[in-house]
Each structure stands twice: as C-alpha cells, then as structure tokens.
C-alpha cells in the first residue's frame, strides 16, 4: 500500500478534541501517520501526489452499536457482504451485531462460526454480541465468561427484555464480576403486549393497540435501581420518550450507565405513520413530537450517549402486509449519518456532538480502539460532502432489504468515500 495524502479537509475528531482545517496522512500499513493543520502542501514531499478534498469533511469511521445481520439463518434478508456494502456507503466502519439469528448467538461454537463468516465475507469490523439468556427465553443466563473470552463485546436479548427481576439482578452481578457489558432493550412485556404503535391519539385513530411510554420507563427505573447495588457496565439500547429522559436525568449522578437512541426516534414521530405505513412499524415505536424534541434536548444535556441506526433489514413480504402482521424494523445503517446531520443543519445539535455520539462514545462504551483518528491507529474514516443534497431512493440502497422508513426523504450531507485500514472500500 502506498502512502496517501489528504489535504485541505475539515477534520472533526471528538476523541482528540480536533476540529480544524488540515490534512491526513495514511502510511504504507494503513495507519494514521499524521493529522491536523500541520499537514499541508508545504509539509509533504513535493514529489508525492495528494488528494485535495476542497474543504470536505473527514470523520472517524462510524461505530454503529445496534445492527441486525441475517447470518446465520436469515441470509435472504441480509448477509455480511451486503451489510458491509450498506455500512460503507454510510461511512460506518464498525458494527455491533445483534444475536437474534437462527440459531441464536448463545454458545461458543456459534460465535466461532460467526467470526469466521465475518472475517471471510465482511469488509468492515464486526463486533458480535451474544444473548443474555439461552435461546432468548429469559430464564437461564448464558456463559458470560466463556463468550467474552471468544470476543463477544456485549450481551443483549436484542428486541426482548429481561422481565424477571431476580434474573436481572443475577445478570448484573455476573456482569460486574466478569466486566461484561449488558445491553437492555427496555420494554415491560405486560404493558406492551400486542402493542403496535405509540399509545395515544394516533393509535386510537388507526384502531391499533398502543405501547405506552410507561412500559419503557418502568424497566429503566427497575434496572437503574438494581444498578445501585450491582454496579456493572449497563447500557440502555434505545430510549424513545420524555419520561425516560426524566428518569435518566434523576439517576445520572447516582449510578454509572449509558444510553442510546435510534436515529428514527430523533427524526420521525408517530404522525409520520400516516395511513398504516408498515415501514414505520418500529421498536421502540415512534412517539409524539414532544418526545422527539425531548430526546434532542437530552443529547444536548449529555443525557444520551449514543445514536444508533437500529438497522433491521426485512424483506418486502414481511412488510407489505397488514400493519398488525408486518415485521418490526427498518433498514438504516447507510442513512444513519446523513439523517443525524439534519440536527446540525437545522441548528439543533453541534456537529462535534453528533460525531461524538456515533464514533468515540460507542467505542468508549465497548472498550475498543475505534471511532477516532489518533496517530498510530488503523485509518478507518469517511469523507463527507457536508452540504451535498440527495434523495433517499430504495433502489439505490446497498442493503439486501430495502425497508427504509425514509423513502424519498431529502437529505443534506453525503458520504463520498469510506476507508478501512487505509484502503478505500467505498467511493461515489
């Protein structure tokens, strides 16, 4: 690999408090040799060719903490190859994959298979999670120690919640002893049973069973109360309501935990569902505009640590049916960054804060050396034309499943190039 010189770029790296016009040098081994305003035309060998980025932006490779991949068992929805292509198109270089596969990721042999497939087929960094409970049944814990030793970065039951309080306390105690990350999907089953959308006026209008925000709040309150006694690494996978923000605000100073929000809940509300748009059937559901604004305010007040895509590819047969029968979830890994940049363009959130929530913060929670542009690190980064307008068209999406919930949406900010370990793997 030859050295690469990128000059005249706006560099944003929250981990290193870097936000300046400068350059980036990638060495022969695909690692960052130099970065910042000191890298310019006057400080590189005159014989070397360089790329003038004309003030486009360089961000660290995005770390998406919540991605569903179809392997094993659901390859017809997504596989490692198509996931990689979709992620790279969105500037995402590392993904945390959920264990809700077939079979589920709950034992060492399945983890070995997953890692081999990821290594052979994926172009990006695959960070697998395993289930909290065997076969996602919510009764018996998985072997945290053995699974962590195999490279599992966290434990979650995906779209299921640990309902049993006694079991949750045991999980937290084991997680503390073994320094494991617990990632909880917060939703009380009894309150949300058969629920399809947010419990409110829209649910009544459409004649659909609602999921109250209380279902999320109760689980968060329970878990954070347990956390006072079992101080493990605990992460709330996604929050969706102002009530959850209030609980987090009250507990943030007393216990250590982290919180994520789906880009869908930051960008859309329950009114967008219209007349039964099944592509907007999500978990957690889209809530009120007041909830959406509360989540953005939570970002600005450091109550939310991470933004995720909640990428959940589903084939058209699973979506183009009645709302009650339709699968939950949307494809979103390749639109995560552009959709998040909406908050910058409408002056809701600072650019550096947005980038922090999709790069250095998730890396810190996962305890991995990604999501930054530190000298000596692997050169995982993306180049972004921050003001380039474009329109989301499902036929142009790289994901195998095209179930985007923002079809025809006009966005501003387009990833033009993505590099992993210094190698250009995506280019417009």
Image (tube, rainbow, N blue to C red):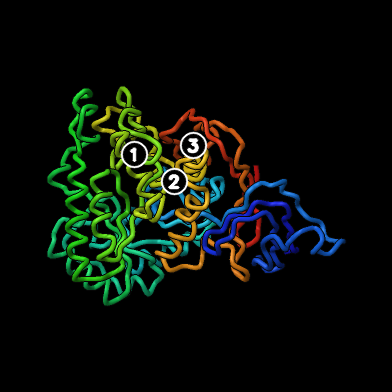
Left or right for 338, reference 267: right
Specify the farthest residue to the bottom. 177
Q: Position of residue 96 (x, y in %)?
A: 42, 57
Q: How many marks?
A: 3
Q: Is residue 72 above or below residue 343?
A: below
Question: In front: mark 2 or mark 3?
Answer: 3
Q: Is residue 152 above or below residue 40?
A: below
Quarter of the C terminus within the rendering: top right
**Which residue sits at x=60%, y=56%?**
19
Q: Earlier in the sequence, mark 2 or mark 3?
A: 2
**Looking at the image, is mark 1 or mark 2 earlier in the sequence?**
2
Image quadrant in which the N terminus is located: bottom right
Identify which residue is drawn at 17% across, 38% down. Answer: 194
Residue at x 28% of width, y 39% of height = 285
- Say which residue label 2 marks: 78
The residue under label 3 is 346
Residue 68 seen anywhere in this rendered image of the structure: no
């Amino acid at each position: 690999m030859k050295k690469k010189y990128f000059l005249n770029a706006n560099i944003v790296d929250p981990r290193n408090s870097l936000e300046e016009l400068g350059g980036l040098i990638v060495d022969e081994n695909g690692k960052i040799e130099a970065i910042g305003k000191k890298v310019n035309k006057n400080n590189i060998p005159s014989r070397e060719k360089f790329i003038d980025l004309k003030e486009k932006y360089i961000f660290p490779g995005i770390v998406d903490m919540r991605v569903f991949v179809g392997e094993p068992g659901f390859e017809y929805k997504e596989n490692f190859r198509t996931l990689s292509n979709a992620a790279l198109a969105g500037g995402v270089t590392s993904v945390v994959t959920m264990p809700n596969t077939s079979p589920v990721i709950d034992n060492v042999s399945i983890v070995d298979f997953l890692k081999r497939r990821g290594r052979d087929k994926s172009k990006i960094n695959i960070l697998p999670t395993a289930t909290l409970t065997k076969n996602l049944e919510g009764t018996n814990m998985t072997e945290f120690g053995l699974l962590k030793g195999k490279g599992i970065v966290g434990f979650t039951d995906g779209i299921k919640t640990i309902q049993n309080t006694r079991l949750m306390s045991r999980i937290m105690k084991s997680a503390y002893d073994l320094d494991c990350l617990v990632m909880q999907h917060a939703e009380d089953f009894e309150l949300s049973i058969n629920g399809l959308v947010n419990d409110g006026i829209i649910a009544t209008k459409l004649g659909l069973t609602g999921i109250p925000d209380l279902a999320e709040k109760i689980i968060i309150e329970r878990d954070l109360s347990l956390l006072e006694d079992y101080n493990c690494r605990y992460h709330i996978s996604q929050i969706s309501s102002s009530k959850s923000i209030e609980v987090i605000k009250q507990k943030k100073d007393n216990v250590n935990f982290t919180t994520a929000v789906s880009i869908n809940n930051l960008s859309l509300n329950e009114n967008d569902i219209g007349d039964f748009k099944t592509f907007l059937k999500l978990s957690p559901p889209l809530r009120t505009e007041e909830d959406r604004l509360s989540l953005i305010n939570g970002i600005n007040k450091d109550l939310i640590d991470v933004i995720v895509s909640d990428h959940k590819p589903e084939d058209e047969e699973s979506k183009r049916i009645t709302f009650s029968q339709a699968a939950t979830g949307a494809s979103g890994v390749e639109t995560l960054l552009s959709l998040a940049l909406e908050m910058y363009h409408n002056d809701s959130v600072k650019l550096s804060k947005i980038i922090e929530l999709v790069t250095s913060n998730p890396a810190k929670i996962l305890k991995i050396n990604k999501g930054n542009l530190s000298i000596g690190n692997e050169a995982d980064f993306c180049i972004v034309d921050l003001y380039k307008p474009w329109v989301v068209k499902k036929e142009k999406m790289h994901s195998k499943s095209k179930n985007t919930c923002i079809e025809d949406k006009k966005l501003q900010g387009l990833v033009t190039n993505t590099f992993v370990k210094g190698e250009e793997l995506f280019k417009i």
